Image (cartoon, rainbow, N blue to C red):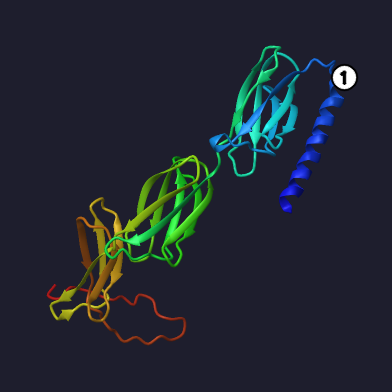
């Protein structure tokens, strides 16, 4: 099966690496100091096929090894000193560690933590019904975008390959207030969250003038911080509406004039200075 194939390919690669390492030894006078150990993941399970690279502090590659089936690796340091050991494997976060070599062989085990998943459910707070097509955004502590997607029919979402740690999950859906919450993504496995969205509050009404409802009036809604949250133009019935609002204090500003109709004939190049006088009733 496929598993055996990768196994044999891995062994071939190992053999090649081992041969190369042995061939180089006589040239360097055999003065290398072995650094060896095991690469392990969650619950000390070996991580075969992990690539382990030994690098000098100046950034030069000194040796490379591919972990065997039991997770064991071996690289040679050219002599005493400090080195950087980098281990990487599919499905794990890469790991860099400093290794100090004092002429004696060094035993150094490397622990890799897997990338983690985040799954969740978005529901309406009032009804508990799933909210589909909600936009879900995951950012790290610096605000950089890590992942985004939309919820499915059952309000579900799922992200794989997230680095463990603190993230912010923000959700935005039509007809609901946007919501952001902090989530700690666990070191192993899948972290699960449930997010309830509040329905947006609604403000609606009619703008009246002395002669009745006022069409084409501009209605502006301003929040406590002075931000314009929305603006609307009234219809022929003078009605306006704002939806998806947070609870809180608002100011509603309405401006408008009854329309004025004037007759005008345009000939030739057109007409300049066709001024229109607007006024509130009674002014």
Residue at image location 22% in from the left, 77% down from the top = 238
For the image, the number of numbered tags is 1
Instruction: Please tell me which residue lies in front, 235 or 247.
Output: 247
In the image, residue 9 above or below residue 260: above
Side of 89 where 259 appears, left or right: left
Instruction: Please tell me which residue lies in front, 154 or 244.
Output: 154
- Residue 115, image x, y percentages: 55, 43
In the image, residue 3 above or below residue 111: below
Q: Picture quarter containing residue 172?
A: bottom left
- Residue 160, image x, y percentages: 53, 51
Side of 199 where 114 appears, left or right: right
Instruction: Please tell me which residue lies in front, 282 or 156.
Output: 156
Give the position of the C terminus as an image quadrant.
Answer: bottom left
In the image, residue 118 above or below residue 61: below
- Residue 127, image x, y percentages: 28, 65
Side of 141 where 161 appears, left or right: right
Q: Picture quarter containing residue 205?
A: bottom left
The secondary structure type at the circle numbered 1 is: helix
- Residue 34, image x, y percentages: 73, 20
Side of 173 where 208 appears, left or right: left
For the residue carrying disc 1, how many other residues have a C-alpha within 10 Å: few (<14), some (14-19), or many (20+)? few
Residue at image location 75% in from the left, 27% down from the top = 63
Q: Which residue is mark 1?
A: 26
Give the position of the N terminus as an image quadrant.
Answer: bottom right
């Amino acid at each position: 099966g496929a598993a055996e194939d990768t196994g044999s390919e891995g062994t071939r690669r190992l053999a090649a690496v081992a041969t190369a390492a042995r061939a180089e030894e006589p040239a360097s006078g055999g003065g290398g100091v072995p650094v060896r150990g095991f690469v392990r993941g969650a619950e000390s399970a070996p991580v075969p096929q992990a690539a382990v690279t030994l690098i000098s502090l100046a950034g030069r590659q000194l040796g490379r090894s591919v972990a065997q089936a039991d997770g064991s690796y071996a690289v040679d340091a050219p002599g005493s000193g400090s080195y950087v050991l980098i281990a990487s494997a599919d499905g794990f976060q890469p790991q860099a560690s400093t290794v100090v070599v004092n002429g004696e062989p060094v035993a150094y085990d490397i622990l890799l933590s897997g990338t983690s998943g985040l799954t969740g459910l978005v529901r309406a707070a009032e009804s508990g019904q799933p909210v589909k097509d909600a936009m879900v955004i995951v950012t790290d502590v610096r605000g950089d975008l890590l992942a985004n997607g939309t919820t499915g029919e059952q309000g579900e979402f799922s992200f794989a390959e997230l680095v463990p740690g603190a993230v912010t999950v923000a959700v935005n859906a039509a007809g609901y207030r946007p919501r952001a919450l902090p989530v700690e993504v666990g070191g192993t496995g899948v972290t699960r969250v449930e997010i309830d969205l509040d329905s947006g509050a609604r403000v609606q009404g009619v703008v009246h003038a002395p002669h009745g409802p006022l069409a084409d009036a501009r209605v502006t809604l301003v929040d406590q911080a002075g931000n314009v949250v929305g603006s609307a133009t009234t219809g022929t019935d003078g009605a306006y509406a704002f939806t998806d609002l947070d609870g809180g204090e608002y100011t509603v500003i309405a401006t408008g004039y009854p329309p004025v109709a004037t007759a005008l004939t345009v000939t030739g190049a057109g007409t300049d200075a066709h001024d229109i006088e607007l006024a509130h009733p009674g002014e």
